[in-house]
Amino acid sequence: MLILAVTYLPGAFASDLPLHAELKEALRIAVKENNGGFGFHMWATVVDRDGVVRAVVFSGRDRGDQWPGSRVISAQKANTANAFSLPEFALSTANLFSAVQPGGSLFGLQESNPVSPEEAYEGSSEKYGTEKDPMVGHKIGGVNVFGGGLALYNREGKLVGALGVSGDSSCADHNIAWKVRHRLELDYVPAGVSPLKDDNIVYDITNGISASGWGHPQCSPEAARIAQEFPKTHPVRKRKE
């Protein structure tokens, strides 16, 4: 009888994704800055283009220094940004908030692609956020529709996966994710729905209605100011031609 050994092959461009230590350092640096939120510690997850978790980290000294529930939410956000971004068009999780509300163009999206609890919560809790986090190597799934998830594009403009960050207000989550992606130099964003045609958070909701259809609620004036200054402080990069 012929027995074939099957080895999982990483998704396309997985070598462009940050290692555990690189992601953890980038997250810690971003969390220390003013992000317009509570200043809480954070979880971050990176998935490859196939939606497979490649790294899970936290910024605090121990896994209990962050909201425990934010570990899986960070993976949800990464999965969402990857699942609904394209090689030539990026959607952040923040961009999806208004579109999924009743009457929105993507109403019901948040009910699709549910999280796999078996994959998300298996294994020892002591390994959470380490290089041996049980989510690593698995497809977690999940759809999240508030700030903190961003697609990752390498220097050639290739979509290589996505980043999800969770643990503070949703607006601060977006700001931290934006800074982490910028530090990792995976922000060669081709196009998007924001006024500047990238995947930045859009604040255009008045009386519950988003003018563009892609708006996100404002958490604080400070968080909004920080995001609005990203074109100057942390601009998306231009791909090589």
Image (spheres, rainbow, N blue to C red):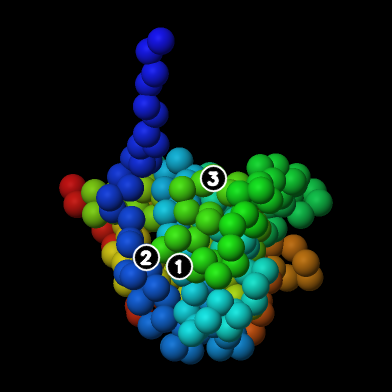
The dot on residue 139 is 3
Cα distance, mark 1 to mark 3? Answer: 17 Å
Q: Amino acid at mark 2?
A: His
Q: Which residue is mark 2?
A: 20
Mark found first going from the N terminus, 2 or 1: 2
Left or right of 89 in this view: 222: right
Left or right of 63 in this view: 158: left
Mark 2 in CB contact with mark 1 (< 8 angstroms): yes
Q: Residue at x 38, y 83 (%)?
A: 29
Residue 230: x, y in percent? Answer: 41, 75
Q: Which residue is mark 1?
A: 130
Classify 203 as above or below 151. below
**Front residue of 98 and 178:** 178
Classify 51 as above or below 154. above
Q: Residue at x 47, y 79 (%)?
A: 59
Cα distance, mark 2 to mark 1? Answer: 8 Å
Q: Residue at x 18, y 47 (%)?
A: 241
Residue 53: x, y in percent? Answer: 47, 52
